Amino acid sequence: MQIYTVGGAVRDELLGLPLKDRDFVVVGATPEAMVQLGYLPVGKDFPVFLHPQTHEEYALARTERKTARGYKGFQVYAAPEVTLEQDLARRDLTINAIAKDEAGNYTDPYHGQRDLAARVLRHVGPAFVEDPVRILRVARFAARFSEFTVAEETNVLMREMVANGEVDALVPERVWQELARGLMEAKPSRMLAVLRDCGALAKILPEVDRLFGVPQNPKSHPEIDTGIHLSMVLDFAAEKKIDLPVRFAALCHDLGKGVTAPQDMPNHNGHEAKGAELVSALCNRLRVPNDCKSLAHITARWHGDAHNAKNMQAPALVELLQHLDAFRQPQRFEQFLQACAADYYGRPGYSEREFLGGARLQAAYRIASHVDTGAIAQQHQGGEAIKQAVYEARCAAVKCEL
């Protein structure tokens, strides 16, 4: 029995990056032998075991044979005679197909070290086309390693996978999983660029794909379209290390522009309401978690009003805060402001400006939230009367302070 460190741990070590989780492959063993050594079996689809002390994952060397469309359409074969090279052959990219033995020696049959040095994302072999998730993974790695380029021959295979409908077999859970991970990488715009280049973005996120080519603001920024603006917004959010719900809201904030008539651009003539509807449909399709869904929805619907808040008077500010449910969900309101700030700064020449709309809206919230709603409720009867009195008190407080 031989044990090798494989995958991301080897890749990141060679790149000089901090090591996170380590994965191991075991050659020449059976499940029974692993159990006898104290390893705990946990794999459902193939033999994976937890080390009795470290609880790290150890998988038996295996091969995979395509039997049906989709990422689950594989027949797995794990046996003592499966070699390390055969196990590495089933991996997606050459940079992830390097193994290291316990003595520190590398096995690199597919020249992953060469591609690491050249900063290239290249598929291991023709079996790459059998799993559509690999397109998403390539895009995610491009977002993580933004200085890497995708090999042209890999791009060709990905385009073929899109053309032959393999991407259509992706299940929502895997799309969301890879999308979420890609959004949390250092340069999320690269994920969109890679998916767009091979045609997968139009299949996976058509609402986002159609933003490319749509004018953002021909008067102030004729050099960028909405897709480029979106890319800048995502990268700003990543630079500020903002959390996933905010990054997803940033991704979805301008979806309405993709279905807005050119003559109505760049004005916000109702495209926020259209965008909110598109966000709901997208989230339902991909089964997006509720925290991401709710924030993306209110951001798409109200981000234009947040930008205009710098010119709003007290009643309009309080009404906007009520639309955002800011008083009951203050954390989500703060995330909303972060998403709007990313939208504001995601355009050329705005890095030194102050987001006045966000600052004024935040100040209005801070003032209005100090109104003693309990005392007001004791002075009025009936829900509507209390609601109106609270609104008026908040408006008065905001007007006085601002």
Image (cartoon, rainbow, N blue to C red):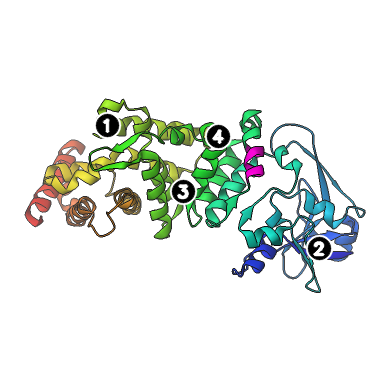
Residue 153, magenta (yes or no)? yes
* Structural crowding at the residue carrying mark 4, measured as other residues with C-alpha within 10 Å and reported as few (<14), some (14–19) or many (≥20): many
Circles 1 and 4, Cβ within 8 Å, touching? The answer is: no
Q: From what the image shows, is residue 335 above or below residue 256?
A: below
Instruction: State left or right for residue 27 relative to residue 289.
Output: right
Residue type of the residue flagged with mark 4 = Gly
Of tags 2 and 3, the one toward the viewer is 3
Residue 48 placement: quadrant: bottom right
Q: Is residue 103 rendered to the left or right of residue 303?
A: right
Image location (x, y in percent) of residue 122: 67, 50
To which residue does mark 4 refer?
199
The answer to the question of whether label 4 and label 3 lie on touching residues, with beta carbons closer than 8 A, is no
Of callouts 1 and 3, which one flags the residue occurring earlier in the amino acid sequence? 3
> Which badge, 1 or 2, is on the more N-terminal residue?
2
Q: Which region of the structure is painted magenta?
A: 152-158
Determine whether the residue tagged by mark 3 lies in a helix, strand or loop: helix
Q: Quadrant of the C terminus?
A: bottom left
**Residue type, mark 3 in image:** Ser
Which secondary structure lies at badge 1?
Answer: loop
Q: What residue sits right under mark 2 in the picture?
A: 39
* Dot 3 crowding, Cα within 10 Å, few <14, some 14–19, many 20+: many
- Is residue 67 in view? yes
Please tell me in which quadrant of the rendered image residue 279 appears. Answer: top left
Indicate whether residue 57 is drawn in magenta: no
